[in-house]
Image: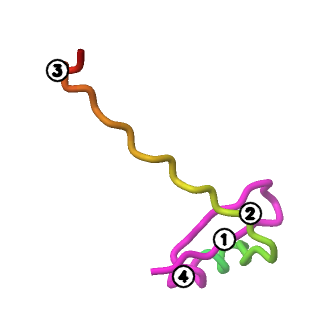
Amino acid sequence: MSTVTMTHPDLDQTIEVREDAVPHYQASGWEPAENPPARRKKAPARRRQTGDES
């Protein structure tokens, strides 16, 4: 399922919501962002230490 970046005129932040939830957020004053911020890549998962490392 895709997401939509939304902004609110009274708040200085953006949120990402599921595409099917957009009408719900629009009823509360949120609007789809015209220029959404670039998505950050996820950091690679860290390996857990098992205690066997030397």
Q: Nearer the viewer, mark 4 or mark 2?
A: 2
Q: Earlier in the sequence, mark 2 or mark 1?
A: 1
Residue 54 appears left or right of 24: left
Amino acid type for the residue under numbered disc 1: Thr
Q: Which mark's residue is nearer the viewer, 2 or 3?
A: 3
**Residue at numbered disc 4:** 19
The label number, if any, that marks residue 52 in the structure image: 3
Which tag, 4 or 1, sits closer to the chain's start?
1
User: In the rendered view, does 33 fall on the left or right side of 54?
Assistant: right
Q: Quadrant of residue 38?
A: bottom right
- Mark 4 or mark 2: which comes first in sequence? 4
Look at label 3 and name its amino acid: Asp
Question: Mark 2 — residue?
Answer: 37
Q: What's the distance in space between the residues labelled 4 and 2, CA to CA?
A: 17 Å
Asked whether residue 22 is drawn in magenta, I would say: yes
Report the front residue among 51 and 32.
Answer: 51
Q: Earlier in the sequence, mark 2 or mark 3?
A: 2
